[in-house]
Amino acid sequence: MVLLKSEVVLKKGDKAPEFNLLGIDDKKHSLAEYNQKSAMLVIFMCNHCPYVQAKIDAMNEIYEKFRDKIAMIGINSNDPTNYPDDSFDNMKKFAKEKGIKFPYLVDESQEIAKKYGAVCTPDPFLFDKERKLVFHGKIDNALKPEDKPTEKTMILNIEKLLSGNKIEKDFDPSMGCSIKWKSQQT
């Protein structure tokens, strides 16, 4: 496991890159289908990473709390060749086991992760109604899987965004396992 922090590729105000990816519902999903929502949260995630596993309850809480107001999308960009736990079939199993109700998409080519600048799992990106980046960073302040959060960073930032208040920090790095790129050796 390689531990990484988020990196800045997309900057505050940059538009969300387009995508057209297959979801665990066996349907294609694109950025445009989420335009009716007041905000959009894209989280690069996977199945096997202990950092993602530690945040699943927090992700489900965000979805349940804001599902009528924001679009929330999980994207798995890991190469399943060397990480079979992250295969499409295992994404379906993982979502069912963990109660994931938000769309969970596979980025088989890994191009979407590269366009967003995602490097770790989880790596969350929050966009406003115009799909401009307002926050890239952590879900909460528990940076290790065994830590308990004392601040729900993403929930606070979504609340600020929806109420028209300023988000003070537009980048507050998430931490997790590296995305498993196809060119990586095991």
Image (tube, rainbow, N blue to C red):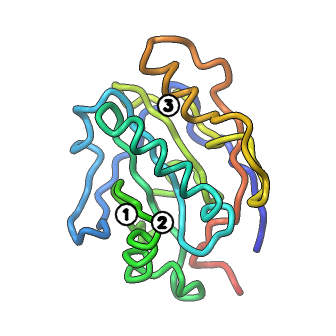
Lower position in the chain sequence, tag 2 or tag 1 = 2
Residue 164 percent location from the top left of the image: 45, 12
Residue neighbourhood size for the residue with mark 1, other residues' Cα within 10 Å, grouped as few (<14), some (14–19), many (≥20): many
Residue 129 percent location from the top left of the image: 34, 25
Vertical position of residue 118 compared to residue 14: above or below: below
User: Disc 1 marks which amino acid?
Assistant: Leu
**Which residue is depicted at the point 56% across and 27% down?**
157
Q: Look at the numbered discs 2 and 1 and tell me whether their residues touch, using CB distance below 8 Å.
A: yes
Residue 133: numbered disc: 3
User: Disc 2 marks which amino acid?
Assistant: Asn
Lower position in the chain sequence, tag 2 or tag 3 = 2
Vertical position of residue 67 compared to residue 114: above or below: above
Q: Which residue is the site of mark 1?
A: 105
Which label lies toward us, 1 or 3? 1
Q: In the picture provided, is 28 more to the left or to the right than 112? A: left
Lower position in the chain sequence, tag 1 or tag 3 = 1
Q: CA distance from mark 1 to mark 3?
A: 20 Å
**Which residue is depicted at the point 72% across and 43% down?**
149
Q: Look at the numbered discs 2 and 3 and tell me whether their residues touch, using CB distance below 8 Å.
A: no
Residue 25 percent location from the top left of the image: 25, 68
Q: Which residue is the site of mark 2?
A: 76
Q: In the picture provided, is 71 more to the left or to the right than 75? A: left
Q: In the picture provided, is 90 more to the left or to the right than 10? A: left
Residue neighbourhood size for the residue with mark 2, other residues' Cα within 10 Å, grouped as few (<14), some (14–19), many (≥20): many
